[in-house]
Amino acid sequence: MSNLARKFRAHINTMKNKDLLKELATRMEWTSGEVSDMLSKLGSIISTSLSEGDTVSLDGLGQFEAKKKGERISVNPANGMRYLVPPKLVAVFKPSVALKGKLKEMESHE
Amino acid sequence: MNSRISTSDLASQLAQASGKDAEQSEKFLREFIGIVDEGLFADRLVRVNSIGTFKIILVEKRESIDVNTKERILIPEHFKLSFLPDKEMRSIVNKPFEAFDTVQIEEGTDLESLRTTQDRETDDDADEPDTDEILRETAPVREEPPTTEIAQEANEEDHPTVIIMEEIPPIPEEEDDAPPPIPEEAPEESLTAETAVLPEDEMLPMPAPLIPPIPPPPDPPPPEDPDEPEDEHENNSGQPDYNDIYNDKKNTEQNNLKEEYMDNFNGNRRKPGPVPYGPGTGGSLTNNVAAVILAVVIVVLVIVLAFMLLKPTKSKSGSGDIDRSEVFSLPSQNRDLDANANGLGGTIEDEPFDEPITPDPAPVTEPKSGKKAPSKTKAAPYVAQSSITTTKGDRLNLIALKYYGDKVFWVYIYIANQTKLQNPDILPVGLTLTVPASNEYDINRYSSLSLRKAYALQRDILNNKNSFGAASTNGASPRSNQYDQYGNGQYGNGNEGYDYGSDYGSDYGNDNNNGSGEYGGDSGAGDYGSTGDYGSESGQDDDLGSYGSESFDDGGFEGAKATNKKPATGKSSITNRSVKSVTARPAAPGRYL
């Protein structure tokens, strides 16, 4: 394992929804109820826009898109049965150039 | 559509939705982005409810080939941002395709020819053994140009059998005249209605139980989506304008679903259809022309013949029913199979499946789940009573999904409108339906109790429908032993038509036993074990066993493995069941393999 990888592993924390809410609430000077309400509205706006085929961009972060995965045949390895899996739409996120740049920077720092 | 929503657009939409002013929303978004950004680099992972999880992952270094120079290059390890959408977002985004479920593809079929598979299966019903003939026979019915004279003969010979098939249904039918007769003149209409109403979470997964791994005895063809019943009907009655109707059908579908996606989907699916047959039968041009004419004449003759034969015995409705019950009555079993499969693996999930044994599981399960459920049950949004008018393409389950958030609650809509709806599979266009208030039946999609009740009800309704409406031998009702009767040949030995009956009987008989919750499964299969068909079938299961992989930890498959080791003595039903669980499980909305 490379040095970088080791550092990376050692460094995994998570910013959970709770922390995010708290941080947002203090910055906005709202109650956390308001913030979580706002966030879920944001989520549903993004989701519905995506399902209508729009892309949603968040400046500085990147953009959400809906990608269509075609129907495919999947095989159950246990018995060789084949199944036709229907096509589906999935939300993907493409990081912005700025964000990618930061990721690159992070590599060179560590 | 296909526009780009910028951050400021998003902010104004957000302002509208939340009632905050635009400035605040914009600030909120900015802060949100800032925090996610900071959080990402500080913590590597940011989870936002209702949106998803952003995560920085490390990509190991790897070798690759430069696209331009064709040289081997080493891609150094680097970071990548991954995003995993939240469950909620996933389901909203996938709305256009929500109605589809994973379906099983029968063994040994061309990967590309799903639709064709079904057609062939239909013909299997009529005359099983001679696959070659079947192949040729299908061709003329569906795509006009048959290529050889033999095809014609095959066609001619086969049709009488087909007709017999259609005659089976009236027998049970006469005991009971509940289902409205379907006039032949309008098969299209009635079928549209039928298929349209169908609760699709039952319909889609169904193919699995219907297709045993090997070309089964006269198993009903697997409906792979709402269109399939059409296939059968058209084929059985020899209607030539199959494709028109098929397309019509597709259009109806599209009313419900995002059209552009549907188009793609249909396109994909329809294209491969004719392929396998086309090149198979080569013939000269003149032969072709003659064959086409002959085919048309024969088809017309058959229609007339069928009409004359069938009319006096009321079997118009019968032939309608055969489709319906073949396709639709099985879900109840399927449900049970689900339950079984889950029980087998000990992986009972949040999705409540009704208890297979208890005829009316609701009261039994109530106290049990009542203890656990409330603690974590979210309250479902209250849905006030409303009334809607059905339009083309409406189905009870889709309405239920829209109003209550889960398809299974169609049962309550059905109950509330029972006076207007005789058969849940048939939803006439223009009917005014009452959608009951959600508290009237304790409809709560987050409550496993509520869901379980609905599933139990659904099974009861479907069984009921079968007991009065099952015109065909395969109208399966897990709790009745009508199949055993057929299986024993009570309805006549040596008669071709009833031979099918017996085959259906044993086939579904097995399913019945599975359905009644014999987790061991052996006892059910034993009764039918002597059938030659099953012998051969389980023989094949043994073959399949060689795929058996240790790592597959689903209970259903363990079951399959276990069975495969046993000698070929008609245990196939168990194997089938275990295997079915694959499709059965993804049947839960939004979960695919």
Image: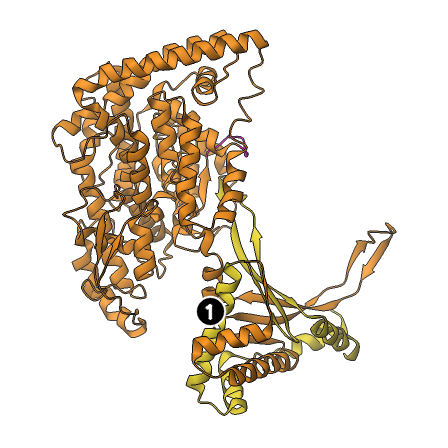
Relative to B147, say whether B445 is above or below: below
Does the magenta-highlighted stretch encompass residue B163? Answer: no
Which chain gets the orange colouring? B
Residue B275 percent location from the top left of the image:
55, 27
Residue A25 percent location from the top left of the image:
50, 88
Main secondary structure of the magenta stretch? loop
Determine which residue is flagged by label 1. A44
The residue range painted magenta reads B106-112
Residue B96 percent location from the top left of the image:
46, 53
- Apparent side of residue B88 relative to residue A8 in the rendered image (left or right): left
Does the magenta-highlighted stretch encompass residue B110? Answer: yes
Residue B215 percent location from the top left of the image:
42, 27
User: What residue is at 53 percent from the left and 44 percent from the top?
Assistant: B264
Name the quarter where the C terminus of chain A is drawn: bottom right
User: What residue is at 40 percent from the left and 55 percent from the top?
Assistant: B589
Assess disc 1: are there few (<14), some (14-19) or many (≥20) residues with their C-alpha within 10 Å of its C-alpha.
many
- Apparent side of residue A91 relative to residue B72 in the rendered image (left or right): left
